[in-house]
Amino acid sequence: STGWPWGHLGGSLLADICRIHLEKKLVEQLEQYGIVHWRRYVNDILAIFKKDADVDKL
């Protein structure tokens, strides 16, 4: 088997670093669609867009 075992501190740290990087890139892209506010808490995400945002393109 490859990778780190479940529960290993290094695995969760690496996952958080990757998640933060990907989330920053995502928010940068969403800014062109009119995102106003983005907050994340554990596995909950609050995303608020401008009233005239074209969310169908997301």
Image (cartoon, rainbow, N blue to C red):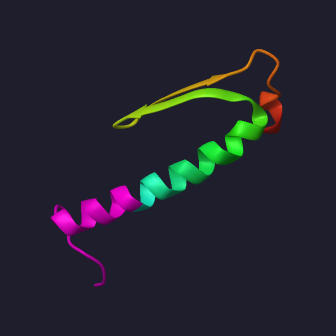
- Give residue 38's quadrant in the image: top right
Residue 6, image x, y percentages? 21, 64
Position of residue 12 in the picture relative to residue 26 (left or right): left
**In the rendered view, would you say 3 is above or below 12?**
below
Position of residue 51 in the picture relative to residue 16 (left or right): right
**In the rendered view, would you say 49 is above or below 31?**
above
- Give residue 40's quadrant in the image: top left
State the quadrant of the N terminus. bottom left
Residue 57, image x, y percentages? 82, 37
**Residue 43 located within the stretch drawn in magenta:** no
User: What residue lies at 30% left-to-right and 79% top-to-bottom?
Assistant: 3
Residue nearest the viewer, comparing 43 with 31 = 31
State the quadrant of the C terminus. top right
The part of the chain drawn in magenta is 1-17
Residue nearest the viewer, comparing 4 with 22 = 22
Position of residue 21 in the picture relative to residue 25 (left or right): left
Residue nearest the viewer, comparing 52 with 56 = 52
User: What residue lies at 60% left-to-right and 53% top-to-bottom?
Assistant: 25
Residue nearest the viewer, comparing 42 with 17 = 17
